Image (cartoon, grey):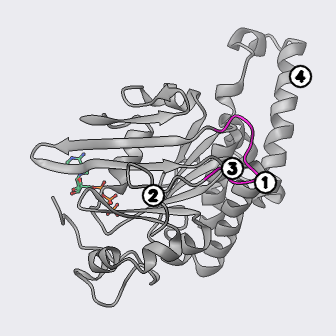
Amino acid sequence: MAADGADGTRSAGASPGTAPGVPPLRVRDLTVRFAGLTALDAVGFTVAPGTVHALIGPNGAGKSTCFNVLSGVYRARAGSVRFGEHELTGLPPHRIAGLGVARIFQNLALPPRATVEDSLLLGRHRLTRTGFLAAGLRLPSAAREERAHRARVREIAAFVGLGDCLDRPAGSLPYGRQKLAELARALCAEPRLLLLDEPVAGMTADERRRTAAVIAGVRDSLGISIVLVEHDMGVVMRLADAVTVLDFGRRIAGGTSAEVQNDPAVVRAYLGEREETGPAGRDGGPRGEGAGA
Ligand SMILES: Nc1ncnc2c1ncn2[C@@H]1O[C@H](COP(=O)(O)OP(=O)(O)OP(=O)(O)O)[C@@H](O)[C@H]1O
């Protein structure tokens, strides 16, 4: 196991290409309870600026619950989530988004009939200064601002490989490209921290490879931090600079991909219910519906 911090997590330094103004995300003693069930039990980890940090664990381990706290959907019973100088626990989702935290969900959420360009433009809503009135009156300032946003949207679309489908309805794209459009829309908010919830789920092998390359490109070219929940261990091992492993709401291991892969507690957690899959396998080793509840 690598040199761990006081909370048991790696205190890796920022990646060399980190964008200015990207602070660390420090999760400490995070506890969430649902009725009698402890979904997260004093979980802690640190996401170093400009790195990909994967959150893995079998089904029911608490990964989505953790994401829901990070994005303000759930309130923690105890603990803290600090993004630089800001405490995120207790803030509503729009305030957290306003601090530069963007999330993409497992399910597709783009308006299917809107063009890719217009869908991505929606992602820039938080950065739009012109009020409805100026836009409605077609004032020159509003037109200038819209042109600048559209130019940035086109840049981001090209960056994720969607430059050739800006005019197409998002819903007409193959599934893998729709997921990339979701990622592009999140990037359009110019986030400092990106929360990716199973970004390659349901994709073909080719789409997985392309999406993983785009995510690596986001880290390397934009220098923002990424927290990744993903069952595809091939993708996790390729992308993650650091990994936190949860099991039944507890952090059972943390370190680099190679370190957690060989950690006996991790192997036990994954092999506990399905002998054929492990952290090095393709799948996260689901426990089955309702496990742990
Ligand atoms: N809103 C809720 N109400 C009650 N229990 C919940 C709620 N959300 C999650 N849980 C329970 O908390 C535990 C952790 O669930 P969570 O969805 O966070 O796990 P997960 O690691 O994301 O699993 P998966 O890989 O299947 O998505 C589970 O036992 C789950 O049943």
Mark 2, secondary structure of its residue: loop
Residue found 28% across the figure and 83% down from its top: 271
Q: Is-magenta flag for residue 20?
A: yes
Mark 1, secondary structure of its residue: helix
Foreground residue among 4 and 193: 4
Q: CA distance from mark 4 to mark 1?
A: 27 Å
Foreground residue among 200 and 237: 237
| Residue 264 relative to residue 262: left or right | left
Quadrant for ligand 1? Answer: bottom left
Residue found 18% across the figure and 66% down from its top: 291
The x and y percentages for residue 20 are 74, 37
Residue at numbered disc 1: 221
Residue at numbered disc 2: 4
> Which circle's residue, 4 or 3, is located before the other in the chain?
4
Asked whether the beta carbons under mark 4 and mark 1 sit within 8 Å of each other, the answer is no
Instruction: Choose mark 2 or mark 1, whichever is in front.
Output: 2
Residue at numbered disc 4: 144
The x and y percentages for residue 175 are 59, 65
Amino acid type, mark 1: Ser
Amino acid type, mark 2: Asp
Mark carried by residue 184: 3
